[in-house]
Image: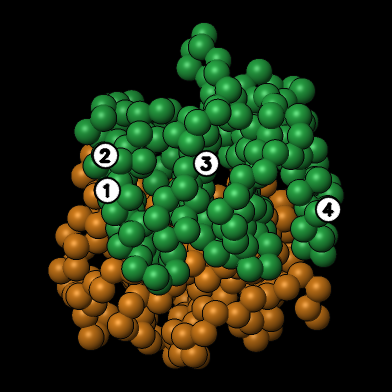
Chain colours: A green, B orange
Amino acid sequence: MSVIIGCVRDGKVFLATDSQRTWGNVVTHAETAFGANVLRMPEGVLVGVACNQAVKRGIAAHPDWFSDLKGEPLTKRHVMERIVPELNRETEELGEIDECAKEQGRSLYNGTILLAQGDRLFCIDGDFSVQRVADYCLIGHGSEYAVPRMRGFYRKELSDGETVTLLGEALSDAAVYSSQSSAPFKLYDTATNETANIGG
Amino acid sequence: MIIVRENGCIYIAESCFDVTNYGQMEFGLKTENMPICRIPGTRALVAATGERWKPDLDRLRYRHLPFPKELSAHGLHKILPTVEEAIDGIGGLKDGAIRTDLVFAKGGGGFILTGGKTLKEIESLETLGWKSTEYRYAMTLFSELPVVDRLWAAYKLVQQYSGTKLFPILLWDTKTMIPTILEEDEA
């Protein structure tokens, strides 16, 4: 897994992430679009995926979940009624929900997903609950090491530049203390179609 | 969660302070995340408490339940299969029963579905959740206060003595059907 930080700003959402992917003993660094922790989907939706690769594959295979928006903004209702049931079915078909997870009320194997469009950010938790994020949200293994810096220093009044610097520092904290996370760090935002390097 | 039946309506109050694993705080203040919501197309409220309240209430938040015109145990009994079906869709049932405590309220009355199958009519005071004993005690201490002031004072007292942050508090009533936020520094 990796660390992904979603941060709601005026008119847009930043998704900042490290580039490490980890499967057991295999560690890689994402250079391709599909390898990255953030997928670009139709209707300007960014999907931050901190869960296993099979679930990510399931999401990438379904651009229709997002193209159905047809110009409308992404809402929690759409996430709940369109995406979550399909994600649940897809996850089950991929064999990623076992009996133990069912006993606990379904699970994405402790995975978590961020969906961002415009100035809206949603978090799909491992139990398939959906939260509309008001300010910022950190997911993935290693994110606990990035939380203190965000809690301590994030303010809505920060400029975009200051926010990006803070996101890079928070990712650096995670990379220092967690073997699940490492540089380089990437920044996506919902207002542009660009990906920027923010250090590491 | 504290529920009061008074003045011909039902008041439901719940803490909105919640620190998730993901760094968010007060996420319950976003309308889409609130632990109490209006059943679409009705003047009825549904609230949820318990470990799985978030996913289970999310299954009902946008669903047009065939809610009975007059709230009664018989009427609710008829829609429970629909509720169970919605929650079971994402694996919310355990041994065929809902794990979350659900509150249904409309007009001057309401019911609590607890333990998955037990339906209980709302009395003058109901307290649910892990601090229910403290809530009940605090509410009786301030029984002379008007209901909103009483709820504020009770939450303030429980927060003070339990050391657990509870404010802001979300309050809905079945008369106005408008959510109100009680802040900690209100007098």
Looking at the picture, does residue A88 appear above or below residue B100? Answer: above
According to the picture, the residue beneath numbered tag 1 turns out to be: A86
According to the picture, the residue beneath numbered tag 2 turns out to be: A90
Tag 1 subunit: A
Amino acid type of the residue tagged 4 in the rendering: Glu
Badges 2 and 3, same chain = yes
Badges 1 and 3, same chain = yes
Amino acid type of the residue tagged 2 in the rendering: Glu
- Callout 2–callout 1 Cβ contact below 8 Å: yes
Mark sitting earlier along the chain (2/4): 2
Q: In front here: A175 or B101?
A: A175
Residue at 26 percent of width and 39 percent of height: A90
- Callout 2–callout 3 Cβ contact below 8 Å: no
Mark sitting earlier along the chain (3/4): 3
Mark sitting earlier along the chain (4/1): 1
Q: Where in the figure is residue B159, as x and y percent of width and height?
A: 73, 58
Amino acid type of the residue tagged 1 in the rendering: Glu
Residue at 50 percent of width and 51 percent of height: A46
According to the picture, the residue beneath numbered tag 4 turns out to be: A162
Q: Where in the figure is residue B88, as x and y percent of width and height?
A: 24, 49
Dot 2 crowding, Cα within 10 Å, few <14, some 14–19, many 20+: some
Circle 2 sits in a helix, a strand or a loop, which is it? helix
